[in-house]
Image (cartoon, helix red, strand yellow):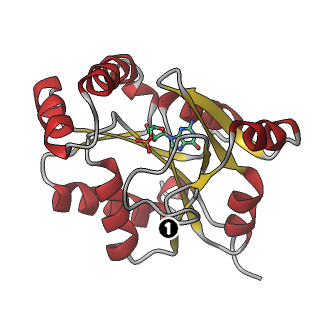
Amino acid sequence: MCQRGRLIIISGPSGAGKSTVVRRLIAQCPLPLQLSISATTRPPRPGEVHGRDYYFVSPEEFERLRDAGAFLEYKQVYGKYWYGTLRQQVDEALELGKWVILEIDVQGALTVMEQQPDVLSFFVHPGSREELERRLRNRGTDDEQSIQRRLQVADEELAYRDRYKFEIINRDVDAAVEEICRTLQQYAIGVEHAG
Ligand code: 5GP
């Protein structure tokens, strides 16, 4: 039997480079990390793949899953689309000893933290609002209205950053990945039981 894995949350304003950090973390950090794939009613962006980036579902299917209790947490993000963490997928991975990463918004994160206080939570952000706006514009995937909405949500989310165990300023992706990995490795050797 293997030891149950740990649950990890990574949140932060969209455009903070979160997805890149998570992808690199999984590729580079020598722990059995696994990304939880959420269900969403948002349509796929170009290049996104069903089952890899998200499970893209209809609003009806999302409602059915929600009513069946399939979500560990779920949330309407940007007042438009629904996103939810699939409970069974997370539990099965944890049972297999995986360290499961939830890349979810602040409200979803707070819900999970209440249920599971030992979750390792990271708030990743680019350091300043100007830098965030620059990154959102450079990404080129959002129209002006979406950018403004994302910036507004970012301002609201920043207010919650001290609810997280760790704050990571992502000025440099390599450094951010290394910092998160180092922190996780300390937990892998049982830092919370030390002293
Ligand atoms: P995007 O549409 O850019 O992929 O994601 C928008 C926001 O939804 C991001 O902040 C992302 O972290 C969040 N998100 C993605 N999946 C989930 C989920 O399952 N639950 C919650 N609460 N937020 C999610």
> Ligand 1 near label 1 (Cβ, under 8 Å)?
no
Residue 34: where, in percent of width, then height?
53, 67
Name the quadrant containing residue 100: bottom right
User: Would you place residue 122 above or below residue 96 in this image?
Assistant: above
In the rendered structure, the answer to whether residue 107 lies left or right of residue 172 reads: right
Residue 173: where, in percent of width, then height?
19, 57
Residue 155: where, in percent of width, then height?
31, 18
Name the quadrant containing residue 144: top left
Return the residue at label 1. 188
Q: Amino acid at mark 1?
A: Ala
Q: Residue at x 63, y 66 (%)?
A: 5
User: Would you place residue 156 above or below residue 114 in this image?
Assistant: above
Residue 75: where, in percent of width, then height?
61, 30
Label 1 residue SS: helix
Q: Residue at x 13, y 46 (%)?
A: 171
Quarter of the image containing the N terminus? bottom right
Residue pushed farthest right? 68
The residue closer to the viewer here, 49 or 31, is 49
The residue closer to the viewer here, 164 or 100, is 100
